[in-house]
Amino acid sequence: MSADGQAALQAAHKNPPDLIVSDVMTPILDGFQLLKALRGDEQTRTIPVVLLSARAGEGSRVEGIEAGADDYLIKPFSAREQLARVSGRLEIARLQRDRESQLRVSQAELEQRVQERTQELLSASEELRELSARIL
């Protein structure tokens, strides 16, 4: 837990959390500035971020989502609602990590197969060259 947006950003770089919950109105870096800094950095860009704000209305929520927040809670909210939203975001992040891991494995397998086929084609090409040389 950090007292301000700058401290939260530094903490996220030191030890990336599974999720960040930030108020829009934080000292030094506000929630939007924190979000922009997180999304602009390769190390922290995929950390889910839930913004909290007292600014009500659809426009505020849309602004938060358009800025890159994964969710936007308007105060006052219940602990139950916050827990449900945070749990949902953590589950979505876990599923995304699992999919990315599966994709990396599939990509590595595909690259291995391409290398094997390339070697087979090179060998076949060499055999054809040798055969051609004997015929001619």
Image: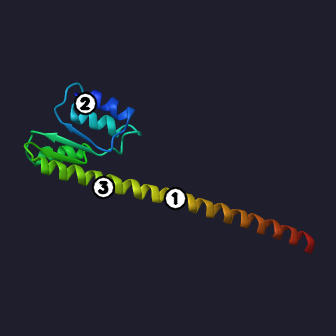
**Numbered disc 3: secondary structure:** helix
Which of the marked residues, 2 or 1, is nearer the chain's N terminus? 2
Which one is in front in this view, the residue at disc 3 or the one at disc 2? 2
Task: Give the position of the N terminus as an image quadrant.
Answer: top left
Instruction: Tell me the kind of residue under disc 3.
Output: Ile
What's the CA distance linking mark 2 and mark 1? 36 Å
Which of the marked residues, 1 or 3, is nearer the chain's N terminus? 3
Q: Which mark is residue 92?
A: 3
Task: Tell me the crowding category of disc 3: few under 14, some 14 to 19, or many 20 or more residues within 10 angstroms, Cα based.
Answer: few
Which of the marked residues, 3 or 2, is nearer the chain's N terminus? 2
Picture coordinates of residue 56, whole percent (x, y):
8, 43
What's the CA distance linking mark 1 and mark 3? 20 Å
**Numbered disc 2: secondary structure:** loop
Q: In the rendered image of this protein, does residue 116 appear above or below residue 94? A: below
**Quick check: 98 left or right of 32?**
right
Q: Is residue 135 visible?
A: yes
**Quick check: 112 left or right of 41?**
right
**Numbered disc 1: secondary structure:** helix
Q: Which residue is mark 1?
A: 105
Q: Which residue is mark 2?
A: 2
Which quadrant of the structure image shows residue 6? top left
Picture coordinates of residue 81, whole percent (x, y):
13, 51
Task: Tell me the crowding category of disc 1: few under 14, some 14 to 19, or many 20 or more residues within 10 angstroms, Cα based.
Answer: few
